[in-house]
């Protein structure tokens, strides 16, 4: 996009700024994936653009992103406007917290809650919630009803996370909780598309946001209090977080920190899981051959019974499908850092105080690392292909010290949902119209993914 974005010769000079920052800002907000794709194509792997009044250095090459997130991570902080906005909404949870001693302590406290053994203890609860929802799908399939897969995945993953996180069973509290989350999600999505007025300005949408946020926090506070009064392990993540003590000081998390962590995990856990599952089922609907291979693998391994955690390691082709969906539709599609001390990236001087933007969405499509990157090909993640590929070219859960702590939980949930659903149904899209990614906080579909469920013999 000439006149908006510019690059410079390597080394001795700063990366120059861009031209019309008002036009650039609006273009970035309206269509960021297209804007970034055009920019990287025209100007290369490292270039600058202006967002509002700030000059931003944008990266798409895996080695440049690795430099920021791993090799020189201490020089690139989370003191950016994007992280400040996230903290204002979600609190100071681990996923938005700045690095340093406080972050390391919090990471150490939370890590045991996501160990394999802990996820194993929750897998039976996950399957119970999944089966409960699929019983409704059985009726929809029998009636020939068309469903929106994204809506269904959001309902399902919210209930899975509520059970795994809080040990919340179906009932009025979960219904109230789900309704509030749905409104919160909708209003936050509208705000993220055009954040023209701060959330403190009492527009109708902002009032709905704050009302639903208050309901969610009220329920979270209630559940935390119930867990702390009856201090025994219920097999959920909250029990583990409450009981975990710092090995050096013996301290436990404060109630404020518990609330921030739970709120962040709740939002991220159901939002990202729902989106990736939506993309998986969308791709199964578009690629009959891939769907058939997934069916054959699941039928062979499960033979009609409910999946267990042990089965997830056997569903090797299904896992390739998930990996390819994560490549094409990374939920952390954008990342931000701020350069503390002057540095050099890819031969360009980066001044102190510069905002750094990197795009896993475009990194996952870099043609030096991915052949025909816009094609959906699960075989890219066969062991021999992975062994040949630079590991920095694939970062679906982030990279470096701040890699997502819940990746094992998310992958387990997705495999159990897919295995349970594919045993019962064949997925048939009702239109050939392509579904494109819609970049907000996460990367969901830009339209309903309308699907007909065709019952399969079990």
Image: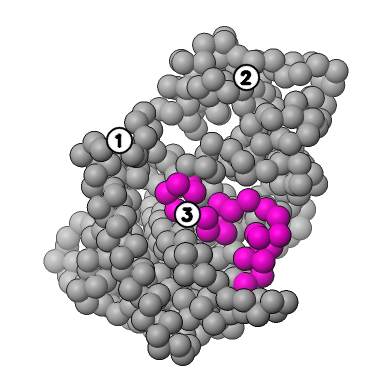
Real-space CA distance between mark 1 and mark 2, rounded to the nearest whole angstrom: 39 Å
Circle nearer the N terminus (2, 3):
2
Residue 70: give x, y in percent of width and height. Answer: 76, 49
Residue 185, given in percent of the width and then of the height, sits at 33, 51
Mark 2 neighbour class, 10 Å CA radius: few under 14, some 14 to 19, many 20 or more: some
Q: Which residues are magenta?
A: 86-109
Q: Position of residue 433 (x, y in %)?
A: 32, 39
The residue identified by callout 2 is: 42
| In this rendering, position of residue 429 left or right of residue 406 | left
Q: Is residue 448 above or below residue 169?
A: above
Is label 3 in a helix, a strand or a loop? loop
Residue at (43, 28) in percent of width and height:
29
Rendering colour mode = one colour
State the quadrant of the C terminus: bottom left
**Callout 3: few (<14), some (14-19), or many (20+) C-alpha neighbours within 10 Å?**
many
How far apart marks 3 and 1 lie (CA) works out to 19 Å
Image depth: mark 1 or mark 2 in front: 1
**Does any portion of residue 283 appear in the rendered image?**
no
Q: Which one is in front in this view, the residue at disc 2 or the one at disc 3? A: 3
* Quadrant in the rendering for residue 397: bottom right
Say if residue 23 shows up in the picture. yes
Tell whether 190 sits left or right of 373: left
| Residue 157 falls left or right of residue 238 | left
């Amino acid at each position: 996009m000439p006149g908006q974005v510019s690059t410079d010769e390597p080394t001795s000079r700063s990366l120059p700024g861009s031209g019309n920052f008002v036009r650039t800002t609006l273009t970035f907000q309206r269509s960021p994936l297209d804007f970034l794709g055009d920019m990287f194509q025209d100007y290369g792997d490292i270039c600058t653009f202006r967002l509002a009044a700030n000059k931003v250095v944008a990266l798409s090459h895996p080695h440049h992103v690795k430099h920021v997130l791993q090799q020189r991570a201490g020089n690139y902080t989370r003191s950016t406007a994007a992280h400040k906005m996230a903290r204002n909404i979600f609190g100071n949870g681990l996923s938005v917290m700045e690095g340093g001693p406080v972050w390391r302590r919090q990471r150490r406290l939370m890590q045991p809650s996501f160990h394999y053994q802990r996820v194993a203890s929750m897998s039976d609860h996950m399957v119970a919630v999944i089966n409960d929802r699929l019983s409704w799908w059985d009726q929809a399939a029998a009636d020939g009803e068309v469903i929106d897969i994204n809506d269904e995945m959001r309902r399902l993953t919210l209930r899975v996370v509520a059970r795994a996180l809080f040990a919340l069973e179906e009932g009025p509290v979960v219904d109230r909780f789900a309704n509030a989350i749905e409104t919160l999600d909708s209003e936050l999505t509208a705000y993220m598309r055009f954040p023209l007025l701060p959330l403190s300005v009492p527009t109708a949408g902002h009032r709905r946001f704050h009302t639903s946020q208050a309901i969610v926090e009220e329920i979270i506070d209630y559940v935390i209090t119930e867990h702390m009064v009856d201090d025994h392990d219920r097999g959920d993540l909250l029990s583990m977080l409450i009981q975990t003590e710092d090995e050096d000081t013996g301290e436990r998390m404060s109630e404020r920190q518990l609330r921030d962590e739970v709120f962040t995990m709740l939002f991220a856990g159901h939002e990202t899981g729902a989106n990736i599952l939506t993309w998986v089922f969308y791709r199964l609907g578009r690629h009959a051959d891939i769907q058939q291979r997934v069916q054959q693998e699941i039928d062979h391994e499960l033979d009609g019974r409910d999946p267990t955690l042990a089965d997830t390691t056997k569903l090797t082709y299904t896992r390739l499908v998930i990996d390819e969906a994560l490549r094409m539709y990374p939920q952390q599609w954008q990342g931000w850092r701020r350069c503390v001390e002057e540095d050099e990236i890819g031969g360009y001087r980066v001044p102190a105080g510069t905002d750094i933007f990197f795009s896993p969405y475009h990194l996952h499509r870099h043609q030096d690392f991915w052949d025909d990157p816009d094609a959906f090909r699960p075989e890219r993640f066969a062991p021999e292909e992975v062994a040949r590929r630079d590991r920095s070219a694939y970062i679906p859960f982030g990279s470096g010290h701040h890699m997502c702590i819940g990746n094992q939980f998310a992958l387990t949930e997705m495999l159990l949902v897919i295995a349970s659903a594919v045993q019962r149904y064949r997925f048939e899209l009702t239109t050939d119209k392509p579904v494109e990614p819609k970049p907000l906080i996460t990367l969901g579909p830009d339209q309903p993914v309308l699907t007909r469920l065709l019952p399969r013999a079990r």
